[in-house]
Amino acid sequence: MPRQLLLCSSSKAGDSSYLAPVIPQLRQHVAPPCSLLFVPFAGVGMSYDDYTAKVAAALQPEGYQVRGLHRETDPAQALAGADAILVGGGNTFHLLAQLQQRDLVQAIQHAVQQEVPYIGWSAGANIAGLSIRTTNDMPIVEPASFDALALVPFQLNPHYTDYQPPGFHGETRDQRLSEFMALAPETPVLAIREGTALRVTDDHMQLIGDVDGCVFHQGSKATLPCNTDISSWLGSK
């Protein structure tokens, strides 16, 4: 299956500057100079213009030009002709709802099938999976469906952590993902930690970074090793 995906867990890692963990991975995925078509619809606390400007400020010094999809007169045509598609983080429910309302889900899928590179972080990575049922976000809006882009045949959980603060009595991330696994045991969930990313080239996949992720599947939690071939998960149903 033709696809060039970079699915980043986060825009920051630790005390890094904005997009610092994404930039080295982006440079390997889509070499500058390059024009990036930015999808800002996960942004809720700022305007789409401001969100696009924030991303541009971080990436233009690296040799990338950034323009916002919301400013295109024909968004579907812009996606089809883009050098690369960049999808930012924020609220996953809002992002998916906006893509559905603007009739852009199939347009992104088609562009990716035509080998337009796709780069997303946080919510932008989450929607690359089968559905958004394993997002960490609040459902501040109700999409028409939880079905996502299905660019990969599994669920994603960006920002994954198994840290439990002392005195915390709410459900942990592992408990939440185990609840999903109890109801959908055949559907893998790939949980990736901040600062890491899944790179997919056609039918090959690798977790890039310095720390392993986890896979929740068929009632078990297993290690998702970084910097090794994990392409077998692309064959999952």
Image: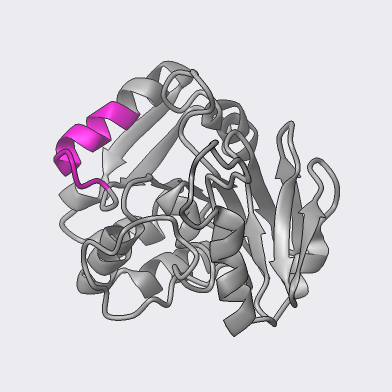
Q: Residue furthest right?
A: 228
Residue 38 x %, y %:
33, 44
Q: Is residue 91 above or below residue 180?
A: above
Q: Which residue lies at the image location 64% right of the left edge and 38% below the top edge?
A: 196
Instruction: Say left or right for 152 vs 66.
Output: right
**Residue in front for this viewpoint, 54 or 166:** 166
Q: Is residue 228 above or below residue 179?
A: above
Tally of numbered discs: 0
Q: Which residue lies at the image location 31% right of the left edge and 56% below the top edge?
A: 78
Q: Which residue lies at the image location 22% right of the left edge and 61% below the top edge?
A: 140
**Residue in front for this viewpoint, 136 or 18:** 136
Q: Quarter holding the N terminus?
A: bottom right
Query: Image quarter for residue 76?
Result: bottom left
Q: Quarter holding the C terminus?
A: bottom right
Q: Residue furthest front?
A: 167
Q: Which residues are magenta?
A: 43-55
Q: Main secondary structure of the magenta part?
A: helix
| Residue 53 counted in the magenta span | yes
Q: Which residue lies at the image location 51% right of the left edge and 55% below the top edge?
A: 116
Does the rendering let one see residue 152? no
Tell me how the rendering is colored. Answer: one colour
Residue 129 x %, y %:
54, 66
| Residue 54 counted in the magenta span | yes
Instruction: Say left or right for 103 vs 188.
Output: left
Residue 13 x %, y %:
53, 28
Residue 43 x %, y %:
25, 46
Instruction: Say left or right for 17 vs 21.
Output: left
Instruction: Say left or right for 43 vs 166.
Output: left
Does the rendering let one see residue 109? yes
